[in-house]
Image: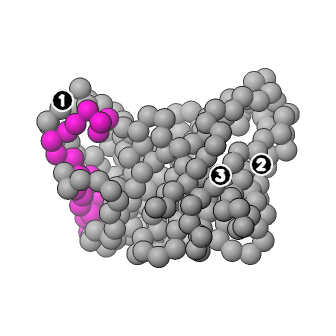
Amino acid sequence: ETGVTQSPTHLIKTRGQQVTLRCSSQSGHNTVSWYQQALGQGPQFIFQYYREEENGRGNFPPRFSGLQFPNYSSELNVNALELDDSALYLCASSLDPSRGIEQYFGPGTRLTVT
Amino acid sequence: AQSVSQHNHHVILSEAASLELGCNYSYGGTVNLFWYVQYPGQHLQLLLKYFSGDPLVKGIKGFEAEFIKSKFSFNLRKPSVQWSDTAEYFCAVQFGGGATNKLIFGTGTLLAVQP
């Protein structure tokens, strides 16, 4: 166990709907990163939040957005869901966003879009 | 583009066999290197990491990896696998530059160890 928690565990949505996924970072960690892991693939970086500001973004469209709260927990929002959004969404927290700092992963949220 | 390749997608071994999983990355600059493991039903866990120094690094559960800069490789090894090593293994790289510690992952290798 890493101390990083995510909710919900599983979620089923219909194409076109919107979804919000939640992540609580490990105690003392101020940086949260989100990754998408499609079936048979490695995790892909979506974006990172550091002290409530977006600190970097991967190659994902604007309908993927996020928030970080003062307690450093975070949300990932996806609008206009598409079938290809079906994946495991992973949250990872770290002490800060510097290179060389280890990230600790949560168990993930399995999203199915029908 | 920055990328990470894992050439073995699915590996089946008998207990006590030796393991080597390949990982190559695309970039020639400064990198930090990681191997993560995902046991069935569990979250990603760090096996080992390399930042600098001795290119042979030891991790948890008897795993080790060797960084060969000239080959852009970071292969994972274990002399004798156990049934409990059945899991998916991911190589991940932090590339130089940028403001984040984001990880670029390979596609993973599914290891099945037969008793």
Would residue B81 be found to the left or right of residue A84 on screen?
A: right
The kind of residue tagged 2 is Arg
Does the segment drawn in magenta span residue B63?
A: no
Q: The residue marked by circle 3 belongs to what chain?
A: B
Are labels 2 and 3 on one chain?
yes
Foreground: A91 or B110? B110
Q: Residue at x 19, y 51 (%)?
A: A63
Give the numbered dot on residue A2: none
- Where residue A69 sits: x, y (%)? 25, 64
What's the CA distance linking mark 2 and mark 3?
11 Å
In the rendered structure, which segment of residues is drawn in magenta? A64-86
**Mark 3 belongs to which amino acid?**
Cys
Tell me if residue B6 comes above or below residue A99 in the rendering: above
Image point (52%, 68%), residue name = B95
What is the secondary structure assignment of the residue under circle 1? loop
* Chain that bears disc 1: A
- In 3D space, how far apart are the residues under numbered discs 1 and 2 (Cα atoms)? 43 Å
Q: Which secondary structure lies at badge 3?
A: loop
Q: How many marks?
A: 3
In terms of sequence position, does the residue under pointer 2 or pointer 3 come before the other? 3
* Residue A79 percent coordinates (x, y): 16, 45
Q: Which mark is residue A14?
A: 1
**Quadrant assignment, res B112:** top right
Q: Is residue A7 left or right of residue B73?
A: left
Amino acid under disc 1 = Thr
Q: Which residue is mark 3?
A: B23
What is the spatial separation of the Cα atoms under label 3 and label 1, in whole angstroms?
Answer: 37 Å
Residue B115 appears in the picture as rendered: yes
Secondary structure type for disc 2 = strand
Q: Per the image, is A84 magenta?
A: yes
Question: Which chain's residue wears label 2?
Answer: B
Q: Can you identify the residue that label 2 sits on? A: B77
